Image: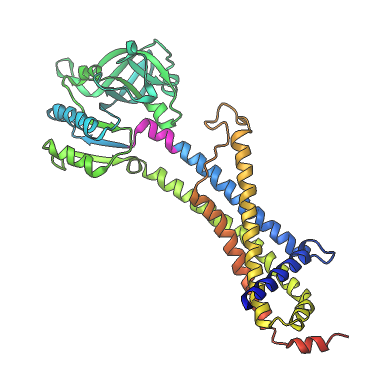
Amino acid sequence: MTSISSSKAFFNYLKYFVRYIFVSKTRQRLLFIALIGLVLSSSALLILQSTMTGLQNNLVNRSVMVTGHGLIIFKNSSEYYQQILNISHSLINELKLDLYPEYELELLVRNGPHISAAVAHGLDSNFELPKFIKEKEEQKGLTIVPVDLCSKLKADHTSEITLISPAHTNALLGDIPREVSTYIAKVIETKVPEIDQYHLWTRSSLLYNLSREKILNRIRIHSPFDLKKVTQIIKSNKLSENDYQIKTWANQNESLVWALNLESSVMLFLFSIMTLLVGISITSGLLIFFDKIQLDLVSMWMLGIPKSTLERFMGYFINILSFCSTLLGLIIGAIILFILDHYIPNIMPEIFVEQKIPVHITIQGILISFLIPYLMAIIFSYFSLRNFRKDQRPFLTQLRSIN
């Protein structure tokens, strides 16, 4: 019976002061503005995190699409050729991985008077082509060059280019670098600048003409994989740990991963500092609010509610107010993100990779967007509530002070 009456008293208390803050003529504008700031804080943090995560995810996905989820690097020697083919078939058959073996070779590319450094990827025609350069079957095995490298070479589709390998020379001709010619079968754009400027793909047999031996020194894995299982299959083909090295995408792009993590951390830190302003406003608004409601609390005390209960109700009230304001901010932010994702057209020029604002909402982003403003509001509200509780004047003294 006591809990029911206590719940009813709290409901009446909550109803009265919600009207006091938002509806009545005596409503507290500073506290109202602070609550609006709390709503905007959680909303802006969700929008900022979701768009930033969308940009970062798109960047990572484009890179993973080209460079793969992982790379197995072997010693650059023809003695491992058959073993690498066996390992590739085992990984495909046993683990169902999407991969292809290749011969990666750093060389020079020339088109007429124009020359550029490049990394050539020799692909074995017996394996499926990577998805980002997949072509018609009749074009399979020809040379594919990114648009930025073509621009540096002043070349285009069907242009004849020369691949020059300074690492392989003809001794009889005075150590002249070997070279082979090929035609550009297709021009692509991966939208990964470091790839588009310096990489090309061709048939492995063309690079064998430069090295004069069959070599495979890479297996590029284009699907998520279990590192332990991959390692077991490699070891089963009698290769020691000194003969190969496995690198995940994160290992290959440590600087980029570090930069993206730093970007996210700095963003959250700066936004948390900005939220302090909202907390200060909440503290000021509550101090004024507590001063205004002293006589209302005396009236409730006279109706039979103990002072300790009133103080506990005040804490509950502040928590509910902060929770609802932060939750409202998340709802508004989610609505804005939905509009951005579904109804906002491409707003950026074609020169930019991202022409539309990407949106990627995560559970972690929602929790962070809720907890930072909410905890900030609770922490600063606590100082106001502690100051309210320090007022040790008995209610009778306050009642007698009324003229």
Farthest residue to the right: give it. Answer: 403
Give the side of residue 292 with respect to residue 274, left or right: right
- In terms of image quadrants, where is residue 347? top right
Q: Quadrant of the C terminus?
A: bottom right
Question: Bounds of the magenta span?
Answer: 60-69
The image position of residue 344, as x and y in percent, is 63, 33
Q: Quadrant of residue 287?
A: bottom right
Q: Is residue 78 visible?
A: no
On-image quarter of the N terminus: bottom right
Q: Quadrant of residue 105?
A: top left
Q: Is residue 88 above or below residue 313?
A: above
Figure label count:
0
The spot of residue 327 in percent (x, y) is 62, 55
Magenta stretch, overall SS: helix
Colouring scheme, one of rainbow, by chain, secondary structure, one colour = rainbow
Q: Is 309 colored magenta in this rendering?
A: no
- Residue at the spot x=76%, y=65% of the render? 21
386 vs 396, left or right, is left
Residue drawn at the location 68% of the way across and 57% of the way down: 37
Q: Position of residue 121 (x, y in %)?
A: 29, 25
Q: Residue at x 42, y 12 (%)?
A: 157
Q: Nearer the viewer, residue 172 or 46?
A: 46
Question: Is 257 situated above or below 288?
Answer: above
Task: Give left or right: position of 180 versus 48.
Answer: left
Res 73 seen here: yes
The residue nearer to you, when weighing 244 against 382, is 382
